[in-house]
Image: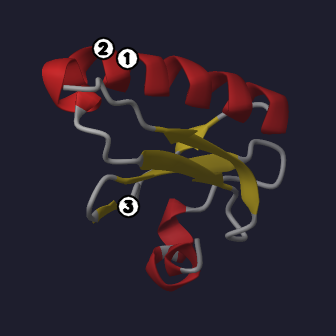
Amino acid sequence: MTERRGVLLPAQQGSANVPRYFFHVRDGQDFLDNNGTVLPGPAAARAKAVTTAGAMLRDKGETFWSGTEWHMIVTDEAGQIVCELRFSARCPD
């Protein structure tokens, strides 16, 4: 997600030894994670993306079944995509 580079402020960057990852959500509009989360590396960021997305899906309730796709894009401090998760579901009427 290219928007990350324009939003990241130097004060938000983690140290070189402890990377920060940003969990952006697109659900009809963009919700940018401007704070990020410090994690040990890309594998931990991917695991966090799965657990966070699972909690978000649980909280969406019936609105999840509308068929509208939403996704989470995880980026590192340089704005490089670490992973992307996509979700949609629908129930035939």
Alpha carbons under labels 3 and 1: distance apart: 18 Å
Is residue 41 visible in the rendered image? The answer is no
Camera-side residue: 39 or 11? 39
- Pointer 2 local density, CA inside 10 Å: few below 14, some 14–19, many at least 20: few
- Pointer 1 local density, CA inside 10 Å: few below 14, some 14–19, many at least 20: few
Location of residue 55 (image quadrant): top left
Looking at the image, the residue that sits furthest to the bottom is: 6
Mark seen at residue 55:
1
Alpha carbons under labels 3 and 2: distance apart: 20 Å
Q: Which comes before the other along the chain, label 3 or label 1? A: 3
- Residue 90 image point, x, y percent: 33, 30
Task: Decide: is 81 above or below 93.
Answer: below
Is residue 80 visible in the rendered image? The answer is yes
- Residue 87 image point, x, y percent: 48, 36
- Image quadrant occupied by the N terminus: bottom right
Q: Secondary structure at mark 3?
A: loop
Report the side of 89 relative to 63 (left or right). right
Labels 1 & 2 near each other (Cβ < 8 A): yes
Instruction: Please name the residue shown 22% across and 25% down the image.
Output: 60
Which residue lies under the disc numbered 3?
32
**Foreground: disc 3 or disc 1:** 1
Q: Secondary structure at mark 2?
A: helix
Looking at the image, the residue that sits furthest to the front is: 93
Q: Amino acid at mark 1?
A: Ala
